[in-house]
Amino acid sequence: MSRFEKKTVVITGASRGIGAAIAKRFSKEGANLVVSANEESVHAVADDIKRDGGRAIAFVGDVTDKASVVALYDAAEATFGSVDVSIQNAGVITIARIEEMTEAEWDKVMAVNTKGVFLCAQEAISRMRKHKRGGRIINTASGQAREGFIFTPHYAASKMGVVGITQSLAKEVATERITVNAFCPGIIETDMWAYNDAAWGKLLGDYAPGELMKEWVDGIPMKRAGTGEDVAGLVAFLASDDAAYITGQTINVDGGLIMS
């Protein structure tokens, strides 16, 4: 398929996991890719895409810093001429009992997960308005945007905030052929979930590595964890012309773990 030929897709949090899988999916469908993260390994993702015949640049930056965000979208325009799809995927989590959670942890999680979505969406929309081609804003939320889980009040708050941003922006740009949607990944095979398994496992009981993850996966109706590719399929649909009449929505991709 070539649904995104001549379209430019910016993805934050793209150095690994869900973000890298999304980037590779869009490349297979003909998009120009701008992959961004706060670590140098994002260059390897761009190199892989180019090695497979795709078009990509890497950008190391900080989604919580306005100047860095502006520079990211400047790089996208300078290289490919426009911004058509912007996927706000950068995210962090920490897990701790409430009396042990620090103010710094709270501030970091809120800054990356919520402020980062706002800053990137703000800048992407300004570019889309300038080019008058419409566009797609797609935000990464979480199952915790539906229901907060133990030992992560800051993460739950940050992801519920993503849903609020999504709905508000969707209403603001609805007449400009710009849609704004979000998705809620469930248990996905990523580095983040390896951390989750270990950290929650220590606080919820004497779990060996992998045991808690298996217990939770057994509770998923589809009886398996998700993959980055499972998420990428939904994101590609939301970015496509087939989703032109879908906006302000938050969609679960979790094997039926949370049904709403």
Image (cartoon, rainbow, N blue to C red):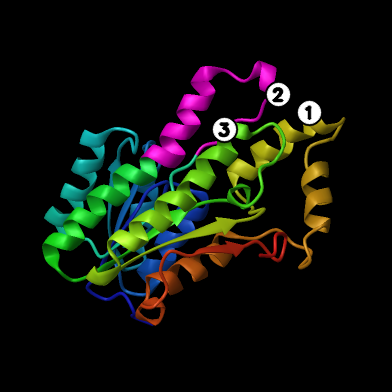
Three-letter amino acid code of the residue under disc 3: His
Q: Which residue is mark 3?
A: 154
| 29 displayed left or right of 74 | right
| Above or below 221: residue 185 | above
Residue 108, label in figure: none
The main secondary structure of the magenta stretch is: helix
User: Which label was assigned to residue 203?
Assistant: 1
Asked if one can make out residue 9 in the rendered structure from this viewpoint, the answer is yes
Q: Magenta span has 114?
A: yes
- Residue nearest the observer in this picture, 212 or 107: 107
Q: In terms of secondary structure, where does tag 1 sit?
A: helix
* Residue 18 inside the magenta-drawn segment: no
Residue 191 versus residue 80 in the image, above or below: above
**Alpha carbon distance from label 2 to label 3:** 11 Å
Nearer the observer, 20 or 258? 258
- Label 3: which secondary element: helix
The amino acid on which the numbered mark 1 sits, given as a three-letter code, is Leu
Residue 176: image location, x then y, percent? 23, 69
| First of labels 1, 2 by sequence position | 2
Lower sequence index among marks 2 and 3: 2
**Residue matched to label 2:** 97
Count all numbered tags in the image, as a single digit. 3
**Where does the magenta region start and end?**
92-115
Expressed as whole percent of the image width and height from the top left, the position of residue 100 reads 66, 17
